[in-house]
Image (cartoon, coloured by chain):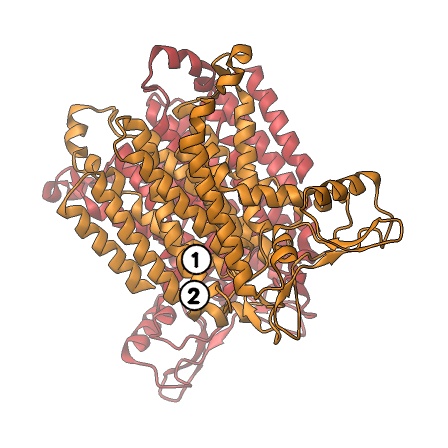
Chain colours: A orange, B red
Amino acid sequence: MGIALVSMSILSLAAAIVSKGEHTTLTISVIMSILAGLCTFTTLPKLKDTFIKANLSGRDLLKPTKPLLPETLGLPTAIIYLITLFLFIPFPFINWFEGAHVVHEQDPHLGTFPYNKLGEILSAILAIQSMILLGFADDVLDVRWRYKVWFPAIAGIPLMIFYYTNKGVTYVVMPIQLRPYLGDLVDLGPLYYVYMAMLIIFCTHSINILAGINGIEAGQSLVIGLSVIANDLLYIFNNPDRSSVEAHLFSLYFIIPFVGVTSALLWHNWFPATLFVGDTYCYFAGMTLAVVGILGHFSKTLLLFFIPQIFNFLYSCPQLFRLVECPRHRMPRIDPDTGLLKCSTVRPSDKKPMGTLGNMALKLLRALGLLKVFQYDNDGRIIECNNLTLLNLVLAYFGPMSERNTTVAILIIQTIASLLAFFIRYKLVHLVY
Amino acid sequence: MGIALVSMSILSLAAAIVSKGEHTTLTISVIMSILAGLCTFTTLPKLKDTFIKANLSGRDLLKPTKPLLPETLGLPTAIIYLITLFLFIPFPFINWFEGAHVVHEQDPHLGTFPYNKLGEILSAILAIQSMILLGFADDVLDVRWRYKVWFPAIAGIPLMIFYYTNKGVTYVVMPIQLRPYLGDLVDLGPLYYVYMAMLIIFCTHSINILAGINGIEAGQSLVIGLSVIANDLLYIFNNPDRSSVEAHLFSLYFIIPFVGVTSALLWHNWFPATLFVGDTYCYFAGMTLAVVGILGHFSKTLLLFFIPQIFNFLYSCPQLFRLVECPRHRMPRIDPDTGLLKCSTVRPSDKKPMGTLGNMALKLLRALGLLKVFQYDNDGRIIECNNLTLLNLVLAYFGPMSERNTTVAILIIQTIASLLAFFIRYKLVHLVY
């Protein structure tokens, strides 16, 4: 790890000296990200024993032998990401540094240094690091939901302050169809910050909710990360708007190393996994994705990339809000004979009779084809159905499947969602804006 | 905890609305710090079971019954500190916020907002939070020394970037006696950043080295913290230099809540302790103190406050660098009959004969009166002497003492060091500058 970090610094410095400009900065970012990925790849296996010894471990319940795997390996992954960012921070500002002493003499106020940009980067790192800390605390201590659900919003305060001071744009452009009634622009004012806080909370927790089988947390994050890179690059090339290009560049500086370390983590977490990523990784990934969306000013496009997570959350709501009985674990089940996964089920009226709202929710889902019922009683009431998660829904329709194929199926859904997002963002958008 | 945080926000907002200016900001900081302290005070006892259940616990070996105490309670302390800072960040900038929209219309470049100050604050929080994360990882995973010794310097990178861009002062004023040879000012250039990095590394680890008995980690941090407050206030009152006042104000904004949460932690960690603070607290405290020294531009005065820690480090060096045999634990011993502490000892030539350098070091220390020898061999060579830590030295001369009195003795030494520091800084300094 030490060698990788040193070579990271030397290579990047070399690249910086050879030439200047943002293409070089982007190249340095790519080089550092590759090194961060390699560093993660080689470091994680060495840390397994340390984590198991520290009681950070869990059984892989979806394997016939239920092996004990180290948990929370998202922590070193996230720390390598942070170190990479810390070492990278000076590079986007390197041109200014070299002229610094000249400017000192000419202009004592140093008005030329983009403090707002540097501060924005720091506020973003701060938000990400806060969630890594909370994630790790959660892995070790099992923080209660009523506390941890709000933490991402607190972690996002510095980011929102910077958003406020840097641009303060709180209006949204109205769809053409609504303009006669509401005008071209509607200023959301403080509500815009509530929207951003909700976005941060949602993204941070959503990766953690669509979880439970090998490779799924890192896999979905990787697909979203690559989609963000594609979106940023589409903006950067041939864009005459300087400030927009800059926003997307800074978004790239955060997401490229994320893709680097995530790829390495996914390699080790892929079926059959040799380690678990932990809540630490889920929070880290969710906050990083939220941050790049806000830094790059494309939070609506980002939400389109999160379609599977949004669906999973909405689909889970009847159980999350206890309209329908919610077992402690809703993970898929393994069939011990075939080794294949099948959906886990719930018997909504077993412990206490289900309420009217729960009944309506299940009937609606069934009507939409989003519920597989395994048993009815004589009056046609639902006795047993699949648990309300995207994973179980996929398994209810396409299962039994191997764990690997289940992950692949989810990642295909995630990729289709990204393609749909690009279609909506770049084609369909002309119908409403 | 939730209620405390909400009331913290409401009270502070109320105070902010009533009047404006930096005195108000300081008042808000004091109010928030008191609430943070109360929040820490009430939260810590509630978390004990959670921490013990998570295997974050250890035996208090200096008690006859060796009770099991929860460890790492510095983590919630540090998190409450961070939340307090996050909620506080907007207040020093509140005057600007109110004028924000006016400025927007007049000046699209937003040149008036002190981004450099806000960025500096964020870089400081980032450094502190990095060390909290590392400290917690160390408590859970036992990170190796060769890695963790360098981490504070990496955590300090953003802070040093801001130092560079904000002022970039890298010269030191020479003492009068040296000026004929070296000039009035000597520009250390890049060496100045090496100095800052070393300062950060030293402060972060030094609290962790002077540790091991109830109340000592939080106690010494509290004394240094109060000294920093006194020093800041001395600068602020009747100082015509605006930028110096501002630097010390920002230093206060960081140290006052630190004193708040530390007092609460010390209450629970005071003899007989009901919880341990953990490496998390030691790193958090060390980095916070380093950061306020750098933010307030008084790193040399800060080092004077660290005289006991510097002495402890230098005194430990012969054992740390293995010139003299170093047992795994150098904590004082308890006399089971009296319940009093006495110094722990080392037999430097038992396992392998001590080298020449080690022999010279021990002889020098004995000549200086800084070593108590318990046994000589027939040739007058040292067979057994006290372990080389400040704690053992105090016990060697003044012990046996109760654990409580040992802590009090160290805190008295710490207080004398602070008084000496003020004397050197404000009186003796005129002889050399």
Question: Tag 1's secondary structure?
Answer: helix
Return the x and y of residue B211 as percentages of the image width and height: 51, 60
Closest to the observer, A239 or B43:
A239
Q: Is residue B414 visible?
A: no
**In the rendered image, the vertical position of residue B346 relative to residue B370, given as above or below:** below
Q: Are marks 2 and 1 in contact (CB under 8 Å)?
A: yes
Return the x and y of residue B425 as percentages of the image width and height: 34, 39
Question: Tag 2's secondary structure?
Answer: helix
The quarter holding residue A167 reads: top left
Quadrant showing the C terminus of chain A: top left
Q: Residue at x 56, y 39 (%)?
A: A201
Q: Residues within 10 Å of mark 1 (few under 14, many from 20)?
A: many
Closest to the observer, A99 or A381:
A381
Q: Residue at x 37, y 84 (%)?
A: B380
Question: What is the count of numbered marks?
Answer: 2
- Sequence-earlier tag: 2 or 1: 2
Give residue B24's mark. Answer: none
Kind of residue at disc 2: Leu
Q: Chain of mark 2?
A: A
Residue farthest bottom in this picture: B378
Q: Is residue B38 visible?
A: yes
For mark 2, what is the residue?
A: A44
Kind of residue at disc 1: Thr
Q: Is residue B53 left or right of residue B124?
A: right
Give residue A77's mark. Answer: 1
**In the rendered image, the vertical position of residue B412 relative to residue B364, given as above or below:** above
The quarter holding residue B348 reads: bottom left
Q: Residues within 10 Å of mark 2 (few under 14, many from 20)?
A: some
Return the x and y of residue B175 as percentages of the image width and height: 21, 41
Q: Residue at x 60, y 42 (%)?
A: A311
